[in-house]
Image (cartoon, rainbow, N blue to C red):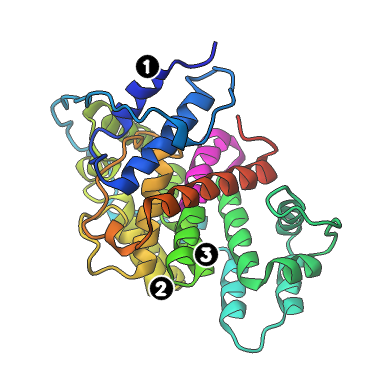
């Protein structure tokens, strides 16, 4: 049977318990989250058709509070941050194609053919780009059959975004199918939201902002790939303690995925703003951040609010001080933007995975 409004409101209250829904933009975000809860329901519930959030009754249940258990002791076998990075898994160097495309896109004399030549040397990326460009996300009138046409149609910066997304998917091993899907859905929603905010508000290049969004949680990926048991323990600790995932990481590791991401992306040399966004996206004060950092942080908030979250990190936390003030968007414009973000994220997921319900 379809999910009840009472269940959706209770889940909404739990997810948004730590934020002030009197803020007009957060209230609109909660409306969209309620729409998805009613549409998707509890696990294994059938999907139902719902109306735009403007038709919701706007009721807000009482806040749910959870008491945290006593802290657990740090594991004695936890490697230091330097030791973790010194293991030099595949993630300690960026995908070569992303490096090469980043250099091309920022050069003054690169052509679409130059970009296509880089992609065509990789069968996986060629197939991914063609699958995405022919998906409902872009809906070409005539099927696109070559990478050159894909680059001409989407532009070099958009191609860089897509290649970064596809490369990130490939970094996880086949046995991590569920974890890869969860990680990718969160990263893609954050990236899509950050890019949409950059387009709507200005101040940051949308393509670079998308890349920063895709890579903002790369520290999670390194932990899952190198310390899978500890990563699972961190998720449980965050859930049981009703604490942010980075707090559980610091408790059990002595550092968090933001520290890992900043160090890793500094080494990748994709730009200071991209590394900064990975390092600061969970901090509490955004007033000194670049616009790109603000958009990635708020993209993360939007993703979590809509249910695109990492394991153990499903509760929305208060946006960083000053972040929402940087948007200069009306509530109606922000609501429309969130709707487009959701549609684009689901279309990209369908293009890459073949469905949006798994």
Quadrant of the image containing the N terminus: top right
Q: Position of residue 8 (x, y in %)?
A: 40, 22
State the separation of the CA atoms marked 2 and 3.
26 Å
Q: Which numbered circle lies on residue 94?
A: 3
In the rendered image of this protein, does residue 112 appear above or below residue 223? Answer: below
- Residue 143 sits inside the magenta stretch: no
- SS for tag 3? loop
Mark 1 or 2, nearer chain start: 1
Category of crowding for the residue at label 2, using alpha-carbon neighbours closer than 10 angstroms: few (below 14), some (14–19), many (at least 20): few
64 left or right, relative to 46: left
Category of crowding for the residue at label 1, using alpha-carbon neighbours closer than 10 angstroms: few (below 14), some (14–19), many (at least 20): few
Q: Position of residue 27 (x, y in %)?
A: 33, 41
Q: Residue furthest top?
A: 1
Mark 2 or 3, nearer chain start: 3
State the separation of the CA atoms marked 3 and 1.
46 Å
Q: Residue at x 23, y 41 (%)?
A: 20
Query: Quarter of the image holding residue 48?
Result: top right
Q: In front: mark 3 or mark 1? A: 1
Magenta-colored span: 173-190
Dominant SS type (magenta): helix
Circle 2 residue: 203
Q: Residue at x 41, y 73 (%)?
A: 203
Q: Position of residue 39 (x, y in %)?
A: 53, 26
- Residue 183 sits inside the magenta stretch: yes
Query: Quarter of the image holding residue 297?
Result: bottom left
Circle 1 residue: 6
User: Which residue is nearer to you in this view: 5 or 266?
Assistant: 5
């Amino acid at each position: 049977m379809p999910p009840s409004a009472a269940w959706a409101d209770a889940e909404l209250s739990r997810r948004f318990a730590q934020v002030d829904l009197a803020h007009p933009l957060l209230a609109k975000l909660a409306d969209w989250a309620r729409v998805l809860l009613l549409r998707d329901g509890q696990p294994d519930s059938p999907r139902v058709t719902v109306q735009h959030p403007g038709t919701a009754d706007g009721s807000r249940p009482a806040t749910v509070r959870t008491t945290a258990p006593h802290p657990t002791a740090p594991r004695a076998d936890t490697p230091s941050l330097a030791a973790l990075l010194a293991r030099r898994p595949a993630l300690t160097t960026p995908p070569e194609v992303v490096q090469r495309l980043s250099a091309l896109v920022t050069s003054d004399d690169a052509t679409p053919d130059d970009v296509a030549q880089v992609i065509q040397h990789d069968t996986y990326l060629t197939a991914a780009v063609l699958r995405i460009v022919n998906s409902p996300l872009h809906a070409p009138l005539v099927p696109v059959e070559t990478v050159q046409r894909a680059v001409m149609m989407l532009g070099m910066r958009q191609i860089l975004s897509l290649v970064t997304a596809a490369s990130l998917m490939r970094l996880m091993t086949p046995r991590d199918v569920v974890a890869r899907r969860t990680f990718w859905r969160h990263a893609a929603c954050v990236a899509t939201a950050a890019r949409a905010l950059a387009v709507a508000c200005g101040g940051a290049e949308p393509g670079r902002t998308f890349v920063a969004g895709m890579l903002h949680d790369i520290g999670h990926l390194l932990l899952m790939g190198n310390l899978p048991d500890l990563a699972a323990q961190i998720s449980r600790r965050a859930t049981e303690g009703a604490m942010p995932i980075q707090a559980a990481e610091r408790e059990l590791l002595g550092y968090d995925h933001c520290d890992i991401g900043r160090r890793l992306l500094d080494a990748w040399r994709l730009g200071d703003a991209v590394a900064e966004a990975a390092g600061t996206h969970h901090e509490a004060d955004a007033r000194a951040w670049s616009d790109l950092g603000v958009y990635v942080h708020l993209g993360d908030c939007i993703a979590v609010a809509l249910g695109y979250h990492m394991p153990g990190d499903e509760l929305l936390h208060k946006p960083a001080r000053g972040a929402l003030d940087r948007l200069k968007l009306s509530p109606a414009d922000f609501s429309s933007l969130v709707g487009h973000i959701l549609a684009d994220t689901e279309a990209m997921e369908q293009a890459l995975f073949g469905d949006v319900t798994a």
